[in-house]
Amino acid sequence: MTLVLLAALGKSFLFVLATILPILNPAATAPIFLGLTENASAGTRALLARRIARNMFALMVGSMLVGSYVLEFFGISLPIVRVGGGLIVAAAAWRLLNATQTTVDSRTELAEAFTPEQARKQAFYPLTFPISCGPGSIAAAITVGVALSDEDLTLSLARMAGGVLALLAIGIILYLVFRYAQRLLDPLGEAGTVIFLRLSAFILLCLGVQIVWDGLSELLRGLLVSAGVH
């Protein structure tokens, strides 16, 4: 039984990491962070990076753990949530795959409206939300939380624990990327950033399709059971 729980924890860790990290994409938001903190000292940037990572972790964990219960309160079935959330993830990935260098990101437009002095005072908004963690990320977290839930309470807790650990790892990655954004982005270059974005988008698209398929499979099984009963 212990091995089963450890396997469930490991699988959920990898699943959440592979699903959420490409959506948050710290490498893509790091230039915006640098632009907002252009005149800030290294210590100020380190403090902001730590606060942004902490806020993102709390926001995403809350969405993953509580979001499914909120949906249940409104009477939305889990398969429907999987289909809808998977479509959102796949649509986000498709936009990333078809994005061009001239595409204007709304997060960039929002970032340009703030001076560095204002940015230091607003670690949550807009630096955390929506620049680092937008509505699409929150929707994906809710979908992931639904996908990890199980009728077996012990198994469900193991999966959720793996998801929380994955979000913690993402928070650490976000902190490190923002903390050392200047050093990391210089050698990467524009071409490397584009390649990284395309590969991440393709993986994200595959995961979105998988989530949709899981939801449709459950719906089809329900229809077959209903047809068999009647």
Image (spheres, grey):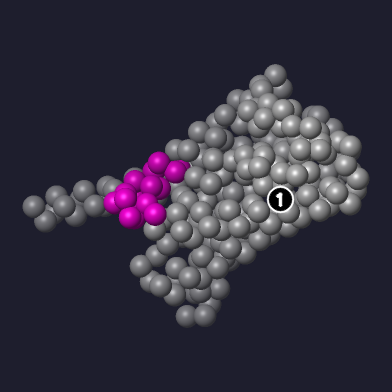
> Can residue 61 be found in the magenta stretch?
no
Magenta-highlighted stretch: main secondary structure?
helix
Where residue 127 appears, x then y in whole percent? 70, 42
| Residue furthest bottom in the image | 1
- Tag 1's secondary structure? helix
> Crowding at label 1, few (<14), some or many (≥20) Cα neighbours within 10 Å?
many
- Position of 192 relative to 71 (above/below): above
Q: In the displayed structure, does residue 193 sit left or right of residue 131?
A: right
Seen at 79% across and 32% down, the residue is 115
Residue 218 appearing in the image: no
Where residue 96 appears, x then y in whole percent? 61, 31
Residue 28 appearing in the image: yes
Q: In the displayed structure, does residue 123 sit left or right of residue 164?
A: right
> Can residue 85 be found in the magenta stretch?
yes
Residue at image mark 1: 52
Seen at 67% across and 39% down, the residue is 126
- Position of 222 relative to 161 (above/below): above
The range drawn in magenta is: 70-86
Q: Nearer the viewer, residue 51 or 202?
A: 51
Seen at 51% across and 40% down, the residue is 89
| Residue type, label 1 | Ile
